[in-house]
Amino acid sequence: MSQAEGQGVAAAWPRDDGGEWLVGGRPLSRVVAEVGGTPCYLYDRGRLDERVAALRRDLDDRIDLHYAVKANPMPALVGHLARRVDGLDVASAGEMRVALDAGMDPAHVSFAGPGKLDAELAQAQAAGILVNLESFREVDLLVAASERTGTPARVAVRVNLPFELKASGMKMSGGAKQFGVDAEQVPDLLARVRAAGLAFEGFHCYAGSQNLSAEAIVEAQQRSYDLLRGWLDLLPAPVRSLNLGGGFGIPYSDRDRSLDLVPVKRALADLAGRCEADFGAQARIVIELGRYLVGEAGIYVCRVIDRKLSRGHPFLVTDGGMHQHLAASGNFGQVIRRNYPVAVNGHRPGSGTVSVVGPLCTPLDLLGDRVELPDAGPGDLIVVFQSGAYGRTASPRQFLGHPDVVEALI
């Protein structure tokens, strides 16, 4: 991706008269000095607030908005969002602790994952967190935990849908999957939940992620709802929540068109009305978003430590790399490698095609492959945009023993 191709994404961030990107309204170099230098991840509170507000705008008030902590579990960021969303969704005991420490009411925390440990299930039950059942094994373990505390575990059934989310970056349903319970097994699981006396509250579905097609998202949500409605006569108790997942994507280049929320919100309003009629006024539709809430609010910043020429091609060698930002290197499950938007901080004369790399002894350590950038050299700051999700904690930070990366909420 050339600089021209990435300009639109980067332009969403303001700059000062000297060309410095502004984070929290302050020049990037000043913020970097404040947090202790590079490499660092910086998350902008104002941009987080703007994204939540944009989602809330014209969203039917019968729809609950949840944050999927796995996208970015930084405690300060989770604490910030916990006061702005209706619930938090976690995928481990560690994330559960972050969610509870953030002050979220356990009644609005849910726990998903195909391989929950016995101890994790016991912790969730003791805390009063909603467990999304993904196997028959989990029923037996939660029965035992419920007997120890004298309180029935709160449960929902996670369904492995019989279809995929079209055009999604990562498909989470359809065919044989480790996630949830196959739709054809759900009636038997509901009967087990009823017999076990667990506190059934609803269903959880997640068809896929990183989707920029409103049509595909709407279709998946509607098909999910229709499937769940088919089990009305089998419910162990009245439904309280129908979590239809998320999958909302963000653009990573100007070739990507931003997701149009208008048809998605319109379709969700229709589903909310159907849900109230079918399941009762106590039932809520939930959308569970991670990357869409935080991805565009974060940047990764590293510093050029060397500029070198190899057979006519210039390389900017930085103090950051794939060990801290695996996704930007193209090694986080991407089928085709595409550059994240990359920029140089501040106005610089001239420009040219360069590759931005890190200090690791592997050719995979590539942050920008042949990108058009202003002339830069040692000491200059390199900014990787769209870095608020699946950054630090999704990266092999111990690889080759380099120092860890700083995170800050600005």
Image (tube, helix red, strand yellow):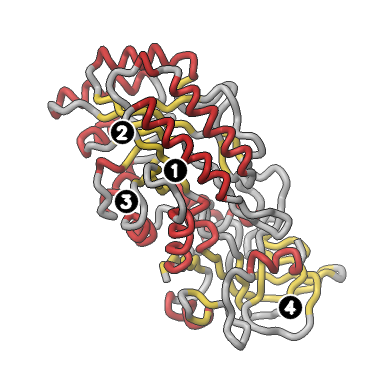
Mark 4–mark 1 CB contact (< 8 Å): no
Decide which of 52, 407 is in the foreground and name it.
52
Decide which of 139, 5 is in the foreground and name it.
5
Question: What's the mark number on residue 374?
Answer: 4
* Spatial separation of the CA atoms under disc 4 and disc 1: 39 Å
Q: Quadrant of the N terminus?
A: bottom right
Lower position in the chain sequence, tag 2 or tag 3: 3
Decide which of 31, 52 is in the foreground and name it.
52
Lower position in the chain sequence, tag 4 or tag 2: 2
Query: What is the secondary structure assignment of the residue under circle 1?
Result: strand
Looking at the image, which residue is at 56% across and 50% down?
Answer: 261
Looking at the image, which residue is at 54% across and 54% down?
Answer: 399
Decide which of 305, 126 is in the foreground and name it.
126
Question: What's the mark number on residue 281?
Answer: 2
Looking at the image, which residue is at 46% across and 25% down?
Answer: 159
* Spatial separation of the CA atoms under disc 4 and disc 3: 41 Å
The residue pinned by badge 3 equals: 98
Lower position in the chain sequence, tag 1 or tag 3: 3
Label 1: few (<14), some (14–19) or many (≥20) C-alpha neighbours in 10 Å = many
Query: What is the secondary structure assignment of the residue under circle 4?
Result: strand
Lower position in the chain sequence, tag 2 or tag 1: 2
The residue pinned by badge 1 equals: 288
